[in-house]
Amino acid sequence: MNNNLEFAVRNEDIEALETQEWLESLDDVLKSGGPARVKSLLQQLQMHAQQAGVSLPYSATTPFLNTVSVEDQAPFPGSREIERRIKSLVRWNAMAMVVRANRLDPDIGGHISTFASAATLYEVAFNHFIRGNGGGQRGDQVYFQGHASPGIYARAFLEGRLSQEQLENFRNELKPGGGLASYPHPWLMPDFWEFPTVSMGLGPIMGIYQARFNCYLEDRGLLQPDPRAKVWVFLGDGETDEPEALGSISLAYRAKLNNLIFVVNCNLQRLDGPVRGNGKIIQELEAVFRGAGWTVIKVVWGSGWDPVFARDYDGRLAKRLGEIVDGEYQKFSVSDGAYIREHICNGDPHLLDLLSHLSDEQLRRMRRGGHDPEKVYAAYKVAMENDEAPTVILAQTIKGYGLGEGGEGRNITHKQKLLNEDELREFRARFGIPISDDTLPERRSIARRRQESAPRLRTPPESLFEELYHGTGNRAISTTMAFVRLLSKLLRERDIGKLIVPIVPDEARTFGMESLFRQCGIYSHIGQRYEPVDADSLLYYKESTDGQLLEEGITEAGSMASFIAAGTAYATHGINTIPFFIYYSIHLLAYPIPNLLAYDPAFAYEVAVIIRDGIRRMYEEQENVFYYLTVENQNYPMPPMPDDPAIKEGILKGMYRFKTAENPTAPLKAQLMGSGAIMNEVLEAQQLLAERYHVAADVWSVTSYKALRREGLEVVRWNMLHPDETPRQSHLSKCVADAPGVFVAASDYTKTLPDSVARWFPRPLTALGTDGFGRSDGRKALRHFFEVDARFIAYATLHALALDGQLSVEALQQAQQDLEIDAEKINPMMA
């Protein structure tokens, strides 16, 4: 037995000696070849072991420690004391702004706790890293966490960029003198906020695509490269549960976006409780980002922990801290030192000895990394110097930091908007707040401004659009094909061609846009490192560094983010890019957006008129509007634009008479409304009514129900507020004021669209649409099923005439049989 024990001990000695030799050898390689050689050697050893059948353990995470070691930590520049005083003043003003507003009006709302936890993260960035535009330099672009807006306002007040009156009117924007929006809102505050970042998850995905779009502009020679310019995205750990927040992080690695820095404020708490009470959100996020190829920098522990970790020779403390779940860390933030010591040490004598030199009060006050300016500065500096990949900084903080016993680290803290007198005094004492105005010497300014505007563009000449004005004769094409043809011509246009940004969510071939692959190329920041399978075809899949087409893959959210980045380039870079985002229908969703102009053109010349006027209004007149056009895949001959100078105005205002009745002397009259591809059914119904039922029907092209409704409401409001003046008429009212007969409108969308303008018709409007559950079938079958085809349009017209007393019930019943209308069919809305 003794011999066996002696043999085991000797084996342990040998293993320890071997281990020591390996470690010393690795130290020699590190000394002679540097970190790169060590990485290469370890990779070769790993491959050799795997080839020998050795299964190696895998870990997507590193120990629960700071990524930047004390030895590699850059020294903190400047005056810590001055910066501490600035940060304290900002903290106080952010808190006071929200508390004051809610004391005056308890319905105001606002958030204190998010910025309280993130103040150090923002202030170190503002003081040392984030640069503004001006002085010949490109500024950084910053996506702020929406709930932290009070802190950003408080900083701007100290810089002299906001007045005291504006702070006093927090979330009271309609008060005289102006107020402050609750969250980042570039429309309401165009001289302050650059990007909207609420609802949550919006900022991260927009930041990724903004960083990629910056590379796009640089690679295409539209923007001067600047390796110092970064896109900063500040977000919360709870926000990462939003699918958009992490859904596109792999793109950042694939596109090698070393101009992108994420800063995740890991205060371990979302709106109602812990983010991962039973887990560890920092470790979870590290695994996700590392797996996506990002450089991950963890800022977990403050400087007070450095000497403790230096004595943790066997890593037992680091291991124990990695075992403690976030719910327990949240409990630590509201507990005394004795509780913290007990639950960290967990009865381990070694850990008790390791922490024995710290009193309970000292242990309670040990800071987390996100509250330590030196640790945050070191992390930011490493991120700024990382030119290999996008970087994410995971900083551990405490939600509601500094808000006292009522708010710091507690589940209620997100909703906290008021502090009592004791909590205010504690806050003031903790951060050394001087209340009087004459103690504010730290007014400093960072040069952060938006580009005021970009140079106006010249509207393309009419000659470029004339091909579509002339129609296609007997050749059948779709409005999508007409649009692609026009887009191809715009891309070659001398003045604006290089500014066009086509954006497609992986359906260019569906939309008939594959010709653009060769014409302008598909953008790839790293070029094309393979030979495409269709290289021998004319329209092969061509990726290039200077490609113009953004082929986004199957992500409409990502495509929309690119659309936003391109559409706002005039403000962020002073470059008037013109994005065209190709995707699916949103007609009803377009209604609530006030500056979105929505059109549903039926013919090629309508597409041309709308796009040319859109470029004129947006880029020459620089109006704050943008456009949505429906183009479709149904092929039919495109007619020439009628020779009437009022046609263009009618197209842009929302409707015009496309075709008058060929039998104007017929006794029965009707007005038929169509838009988009269903115009063909309306025109067929016009013929049916004329040939079979002696109805003279005019056909109107309704290019925009939204435009008609908006102008109608504007006229209603003006007439209501000016009762002593001659009433005005809307464009729709003028068009149909003297139109005889009944009114019928058919839509490939829901009845709500034509119904939305029914009040401006002189007589009742019959609306037909495709209300009901989605179906998969051909157009003809679906239009018949939803009762919007030519036969049903004709029957609805006859029914309206019967209701008006101009047609007998017997004649209507006979028409129902002739047109094969099934009266017993199940309602398509419920079928």
Image (cartoon, grey):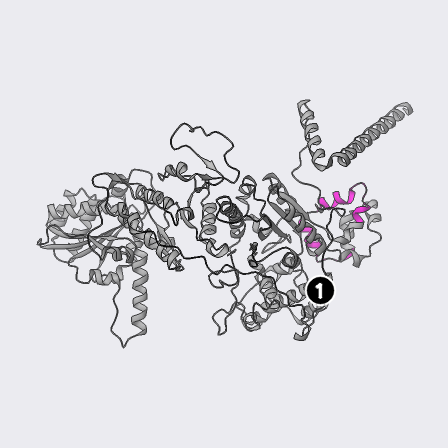
Mark 1 lies on a secondary structure that is helix
Out of 816 and 682, give the one closest to the viewer: 682
Magenta stretch: helix, strand or loop mostly: helix
Question: Residue 72's spot in the image, x, y percent?
Answer: 74, 46
Q: Is residue 646 left or right of residue 194?
A: left
Q: Is residue 672 magenta?
A: no
Q: Is residue 780 left or right of residue 8?
A: left
Rendered image quadrant of residue 154: bottom right
Question: Residue 735's spot in the image, x, y percent?
Answer: 21, 60
Question: Residue 556's spot in the image, x, y percent?
Answer: 44, 45
Locate the C terminus and report the quarter of the image it occupies. Answer: top left
Locate the N terminus and report the quarter of the image it occupies. Answer: top right
> In the rendered structure, which segment of residues is drawn in magenta?
308-337
Out of 332 and 244, give the one closest to the viewer: 244
Residue lying at the far bottom in this picture: please name it: 724
Q: How many marks?
A: 1
Can residue 489 be seen from the camera position used here?
yes
Q: Is residue 321 magenta?
A: yes
Out of 706 and 143, give the one closest to the viewer: 143
Residue with the mark numbered 1: 82
Can residue 603 be seen from the camera position used here?
no
Q: Is residue 357 above or below residue 784?
A: below
Q: Is residue 626 left or right of residue 604?
A: right
> Mark 1 Cα within 10 Å, few/some/many (few <14, many 20+)?
few
Question: Residue 452's spot in the image, x, y percent?
Answer: 48, 61
Q: Is residue 602 above or below residue 440?
A: above
Amino acid bearing label 1:
Ile
